[in-house]
Image: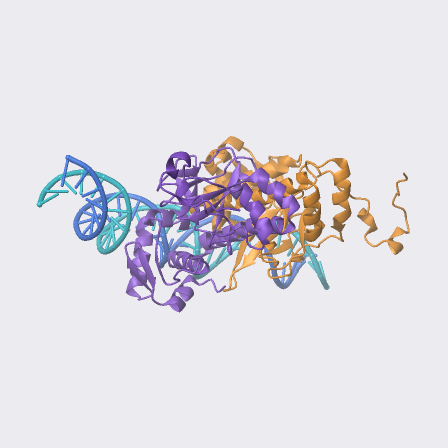
Chain colours: A purple, B orange, C cyan, D blue
Amino acid sequence: MTIHIAQQGDAAVKPCNHDYQVNCGNCRLNGICLPLALESDDIQQLDDIIQRSKPLQKNQHLYREGDHFQSVFAVRSGTLKAYKTTDDGREQVTGFYFPGEILGMDGISNNAHASSAKALETAAICEIPFVSLERLSALMPNLQRHFFQLMSREITEDQQLITLLSKNSADERVAALMLSISGRNARRKLSATQFRLPMSRVDIGNYLGLTVETVSRVFSRMQKMAVLRVDNKEIEILDPAGLRSMANLGS
Amino acid sequence: MTIHIAQQGDAAVKPCNHDYQVNCGNCRLNGICLPLALESDDIQQLDDIIQRSKPLQKNQHLYREGDHFQSVFAVRSGTLKAYKTTDDGREQVTGFYFPGEILGMDGISNNAHASSAKALETAAICEIPFVSLERLSALMPNLQRHFFQLMSREITEDQQLITLLSKNSADERVAALMLSISGRNARRKLSATQFRLPMSRVDIGNYLGLTVETVSRVFSRMQKMAVLRVDNKEIEILDPAGLRSMANLGS
DNA sequence: TGACCGCCTTGATGTGCATCAAGTTAGCAG
DNA sequence: CTGCTAACTTGATGCACATCAAGGCGGTCA
């Protein structure tokens, strides 16, 4: 078996050659992404159904509410936001998706995407055609189990957000989001205490059911309390314990 | 093939004889419940894994947050509420479950129930052991698909609630819940305009992120506007169009 | 370099719902 | 029936966050 190495001039014959060699087997996210819990033979099969197209640019849509549902997607790099548009034109951000996370599962129930997804920055995406995933799931119990678990996690996370929106103050909501992002960074072996927010204050507010002004004020307050250092989108968590107690979530 | 008819005296040998003859094939909910989209042979197989135990009394728990996850459940009669307890002891109701609906799917991700479920009134339940369901799903593509869809629907419904909590006024929230209950009644061929609320004002408020007092005031206001007739738990929708416009959801 | 624009911050004011408080009604046991 | 309790309603007051308004900062394009 020979391995084809990228060369000058390939671009003309192979679009997207810059990362054609990426696959689930060598992807550094495979410990947290869909291949989790699969044997290497199985990973190979999963890999065969996955499509990798050219990266999404900032603000490009991966799919839009109402689009025919065909695939779920894994984030390989970058960040996306999912959102619904209410009939009176307002937006509700329903989630942020970081590398290694799966989105699009809300489209399964009606064969149409229930929300839109757009890139907050340049993002590389793995597309997983759902019919292939179903076929494979029937053959690979571990994959079926894992996908059930992924959907179940989406449910529990939504329920967390419901509780947050319904019971927690502005301070608590923002603190909880910072902790969530911190934890997801840690899962990807990135710093849990220093990171750059990929989303705007508007998006944060929208996600947390707050206005921009309130989000901004909360950040200022946390900075004054020396819990966070905030420099525009750069965040440093100075006092993780303090932040956790502010979030008031316990778990 | 002989059909065994219930007789006096069976009780001694068969506990729970009062409804031992219920099965998915003859259940009047099979058009909206899990068996939906299955052939009758397949329904038989599904039926074989389903366990029907004696009904839950009002306020009894079906499962509690943290319990080991083994099964998902279908409601055959009665109503349940699912709720989480925050670490500071408060409750967050995450959903109400009516006949034909499935609950417990949030336990799949961690092999432990992420919420508690208790009966709001006497309720008959079908228990579906998850390992059996997985096994069967691998053999029956339609079942696998349908279960994926059910989980996906749970996700989209949670997202609806998120939007409701984050963007809508007290009036809109209550109106949306009334419409939701009305629609779910219609699905079960019951009246869409007259029904009895199985849950208390406290539960409604808790679910919608409001206090009891606010819920009560909204009901009074709607009654004054002749949109609803409210007599304690008895509800009559007098002006469905008005209620829809109050809910301000469009879809 | 300056002018524009999107994004963020900060302050002043307003309001929808929570909170507090005091009945009223329904269900139930005796 | 009488008394008890849980559930609900209604009113008065307060507050967290929205809204309105103005200004600062950073990036980009001519």
Residue B242 drawn at (x, y percent)? 49, 33
Numbered label tally = 0
Q: Who is closer to the viewer here, B42 or C29?
A: B42
Residue B117 drawn at (x, y percent)? 62, 55
Q: Residue furthest top?
A: B241
- Res C28 → quadrant: bottom right
Observer able to see residue B229: no
| Above or below for B230 versus A156 | above
Observer able to see residue B81: yes
Q: Who is closer to the viewer here, B160 or A21?
A: A21
| Above or below for B82 versus D29 | below
| Above or below for B126 versus A237 | above
Q: Who is closer to the viewer here, C11 or A88?
A: A88
Q: Who is closer to the viewer here, B56 or C29?
A: B56
Q: Residue furthest front?
A: A2
| Above or below for A141 versus A240 | above
Residue B178 drawn at (x, y percent)? 55, 40
- Res A134 → quadrant: top right
Taking the image as shown, residue B27 lies to the left or right of residue A47, namely: right
Residue B2 drawn at (x, y percent)? 90, 40
Taking the image as shown, residue A204 lies to the left or right of residue B2, namely: left
